[in-house]
């Protein structure tokens, strides 16, 4: 895989994480004070996505800048997912919110699989993506458990 393709993959993932982190932080404003567990969960999700974005940003510095346009392929998905999260928050439906978070993390996991399936991914990038994918799977399982048994963290 050439450096241009590697940079494209990293940039796309970085943008997905930055957008999701921002949306999770926006959702925090909709959490009623009495729902501290939901607040803590959304804050942890935002911080985890920011951490993944920071890691990708450091690796991106190793690859030359290119004329790759800013990706927009993840934007419709993120906008649609945000609408579902916002609706769940406005309806005060914790179960629906947790199911949407699970769906978001599952979609991200599928995207990581696609990235990891690319031929000739440099070893340092592949190692980082595998590590991040494990974190995504952990968050996916966590949100699934919380959706099934909301008081469990």
Image (cartoon, helix red, strand yellow):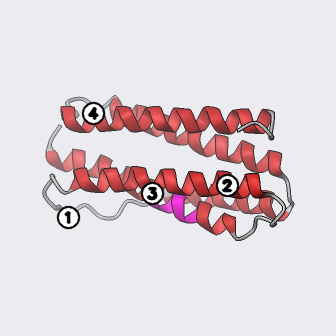
- The residue identified by callout 2 is 40
Residue ID for mark 4 = 126
* CA distance for labels 2 and 4: 31 Å
In this rendering, would 45 be left or right of 65?
right
Which of the numbered marks, if any, corresponds to residue 67? 1
Check the picture and name the quadrant holding the N terminus.
Answer: top left
Q: Is residue 146 magenta?
A: no
Left or right, 18 with respect to 9, comes to: right
* Camera-side mark, 3 or 4: 3
Percent across and percent down for residue 58 are 25, 54
Asked whether disc 1 touches disc 3, contact meaning CB atoms under 8 Å apart, the reply is no
Q: From the image, give the main secondary structure of the stretch colored magenta.
A: helix
Q: Position of residue 78 (x, y in %)?
A: 57, 57
Q: CA distance from mark 2 to mark 3?
A: 15 Å
Q: Which residue is mark 3?
A: 50
Q: Nearer the viewer, mark 1 or mark 3?
A: 3
């Amino acid at each position: 895989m050439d450096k241009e393709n590697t940079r494209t993959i990293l940039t796309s993932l970085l943008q997905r994480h930055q957008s999701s982190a921002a949306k999770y932080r926006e959702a925090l404003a909709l959490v009623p004070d009495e729902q501290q567990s939901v607040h803590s969960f959304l804050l942890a999700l935002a911080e985890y996505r920011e951490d993944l974005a920071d890691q990708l940003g450091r690796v991106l510095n190793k690859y030359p800048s290119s004329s790759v346009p800013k990706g927009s392929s993840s934007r419709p998905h993120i906008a649609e997912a945000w609408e579902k999260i916002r609706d769940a928050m406005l309806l005060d439906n914790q179960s629906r919110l947790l199911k949407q978070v699970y769906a978001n993390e599952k979609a991200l996991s599928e995207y990581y699989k696609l990235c990891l399936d690319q031929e000739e991914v440099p070893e340092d990038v592949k190692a980082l993506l595998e590590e991040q994918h494990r974190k995504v799977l952990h968050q996916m399982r966590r949100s699934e458990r919380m959706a099934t048994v909301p008081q469990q963290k």
